[in-house]
Image (spheres, rainbow, N blue to C red):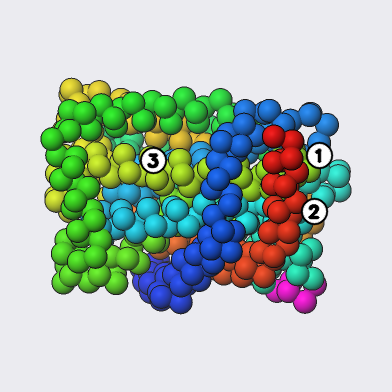
Amino acid sequence: MFKRIEQLVAAFSSWIWDWPLLFLLIGGGLFFLIYSRFTPFLYFKHAIDILRGKFDDGKEDGQLTHFQALSSVIAATVGMGNISGVAIAIVAGGPGAIFWMWVSGIIGMATKFYTCSLAIMYRSKDEKNIPLGGPMYVITAGLGSKWKPLAILFALAGLVGTLPAFTANQLTQTLVDVMGWTEGDKFYIGITLAIIASFVILGGIKRIGAVASRLVPAMVALYFITVLTILIIQIEYVPEMFILIFKDAFSGEAVAGGALGYLIKTGIKRGSFSNEAGIGTAPMMHGTTKTKEPIREGLVAMTGPAIDTLVVCTLTALAILSTGVWKDGDENGITLTLKAFNSVLPYGIGDIILIIMILVFAFSTLFSYSYYGNLCLGFLTKPKYGKYYNYIYIPSIVVAAVVKIDFAINLIDSAFALMAIPTVISGLLLAPKVNQRAKAYFKSLNSVV
């Protein structure tokens, strides 16, 4: 029975992640990029100033600061999507898949600017007057009640897409690989993870944001230093790896049969999983920010893909490629990344560093995703009932720990695809509203300067 379910999920994932959806994500992102006239990219420094709290007054509605919201989003994207997802992309699509991840990252910056600005423009409030954001609220408030079926589609898909299938699975696999445990131990690992995660998850969004803002910056810095160390040791191979990425991106020679189309789809799919631009998860978190200015939050959100895809994904890819472990064809992403670390760093150090970072990133991801699921259930019922999603989410960590990696990937990919359709469509339809606000905001900013 379960085997049949695995086959159906795999078939659906392959079908929906074909050219029409990729055209929507990439075509939509390119539209945002051109329609904005690249203006948001000129205010990258301003976005950093916003993150530093330069424009905070402490009196605005919301639950998280700009920095806490971005940290929570990055916790979910820099985590398994970068450390494990990059390895999976290279094995499935070859080195050229990284180039298409870069493409996804660049246009993803424009997509996040629009979708997260809209999350503030059209956010709702719960029974306690606490702001709620996300594509489902953007659709109903920005497009009207006739578009509500599209909002319901997003929320239903979000109930599945925010499950911990991929994260818990890969975290469990890491512990098994590093600690030398057996496959039979995965069930007990899953129970332990669920118990630990519940302490933060049941504390609500403020506790999630507080924990993420403390843990994520330190872990990104540690990961950055570690991978840079590997690249310095392997420096003679790095230029060759860049050439390989660009060459393979348009030839597909590293992919069986030279399937260039498959390579592009793999890169875009893994890029979308890495930065989640256009998927709709980030607007749910950014929609809780303490701000009244939508464009500020759009600028902050825009920095996310730059950090997780253009920087962290690139470093991970170069570490894997320069060490040559990708040629082994190991389909488990975490295992491949571990091999890359251990092939260069002194014995045991790679395991220790990576497991610490994966534990932090994975738990941060588990925290953030639980909130996304809460919002989706709250939209489908009433906001006060959203918290009951946790009682589905926490036990599912145990299930996710023992399922096969292919099933975990296909399940989340399928749900993400269904979430992307309402997110991008609503973003495209409401883009003129964002441009109108952006024009006024940048004009007032420049007049002050």
Q: Residues within 10 Å of mark 3 (few under 14, many from 20)?
A: some
Prevailing secondary structure class for the magenta stretch in the rendered image: helix
x and y, in percent, of residue 203 in the image: 68, 34
Residue hosting label 3? 311
Is there a contact, CB below 8 Å, between mark 1 and mark 2? no
| Pair 3/2: label in front | 3
Disc 2 residue type (three-letter)? Ser
x and y, in percent, of residue 179 in the image: 28, 30
Residue hosting label 2? 124
The segment highlighted magenta reads 145-149
Disc 3 residue type (three-letter)? Val
Q: CA distance from mark 1 to mark 3?
A: 32 Å
- What residue do we see at 81% from left, 36% from top? 60
Nearer the observer, 22 or 256: 22
When the figure is inspected, residue 152 is found, relative to residue 325, above or below; the finding is below
Write down the quadrant of residue 368 in the picture. top right
Q: Is residue 51 visible?
A: no
Per the rendering, the mark at residue 61 is 1
